Image: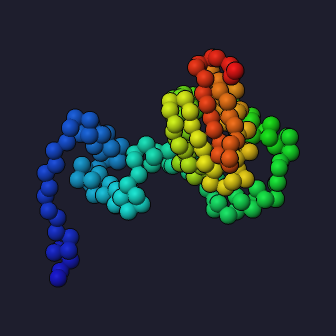
Amino acid sequence: MGSEEKKAQKRVTVALDSENLERLEKIKSELMTSKSEVIRRALPYLEVILERGNISPQGLETILDLRYRPDNLIFDIGLFQAFLDEIGEGSDQLKEDIRQIGKEFYSEYCDIGIIKPIECLKRLERTNLYTLIVGSDDSFTLVPTIPEMRKFLKVFFEGYLEASPNKGEVRIVHGKIRIKINKRGNETS
């Protein structure tokens, strides 16, 4: 079989709605290439995504946001567990630092349009620190991937809520973190 036969291309017609056509035109302009080349370049990425469990565009965007920020790390849970074992209970200063980081997250998330607690919880769930269970619009349960993380996650979310107009309560109950959001601006009773 000659190289011409291997490289033979078939013409394909695709029907696109206006939103996707606009998206294709934008990418075509950014890459300064043809629409066909955009599709050819996109297919290997789509194939990888489908092989990895069909992640949503929002999920992929979150993962890429977290991955490409220089202030984030990706490492094995076993390594994280070793750090937690060494830290133990953690000092009061460490807990205060984690609380402050929670407050800063609220501010940073507001800057990118993540306002509601559920949006924050779903976004951070993609880091694999916990599994999120949504009880209702204002009641959430977090099951930490590493049990020793629960006390630090609790402090983090307390800080997050302190900075937020959404006041609430963060408790550890039977190894899980329970977050109950009160109506906007109301204090916990």
Which of these two is toward me, 93 or 17? 93
Q: How many marks?
A: 0
Q: Using the rendered view, name the quadrant where residue 91 is placed.
A: top right
Residue 71 is left or right of residue 56, and the answer is: right
Residue at x 25%, y 50% (from the top left corner): 34
Which of these two is toward me, 20 or 34? 20
Q: Position of residue 84 (x, y in %)?
A: 76, 56
Whether residue 28 is situated above or below residue 52 in the rendered picture: above
Residue at x 16%, y 75% (from the top left corner): 5
Q: Residue furthest bottom?
A: 1
Residue 131 is left or right of residue 56, and the answer is: right
Q: Position of residue 109 (x, y in %)?
A: 58, 32
In the rendered view of the protein, which quadrant contains the N terminus?
A: bottom left
Residue at x 40%, y 47% (from the top left corner): 56
Residue at x 86%, y 40% (from the top left corner): 92
Residue 148 is left or right of residue 111, and the answer is: right
Q: Position of residue 37 (x, y in %)?
A: 27, 54
Q: Using the rendered view, name the quadrant where residue 42 is placed.
A: bottom left
In the rendered view of the protein, which quadrant contains the C terminus?
A: top right
Which of these two is toward me, 18 or 110? 110
Residue 68 visible somewhere in the drawing: no
Residue 63 is left or right of residue 167, and the answer is: left
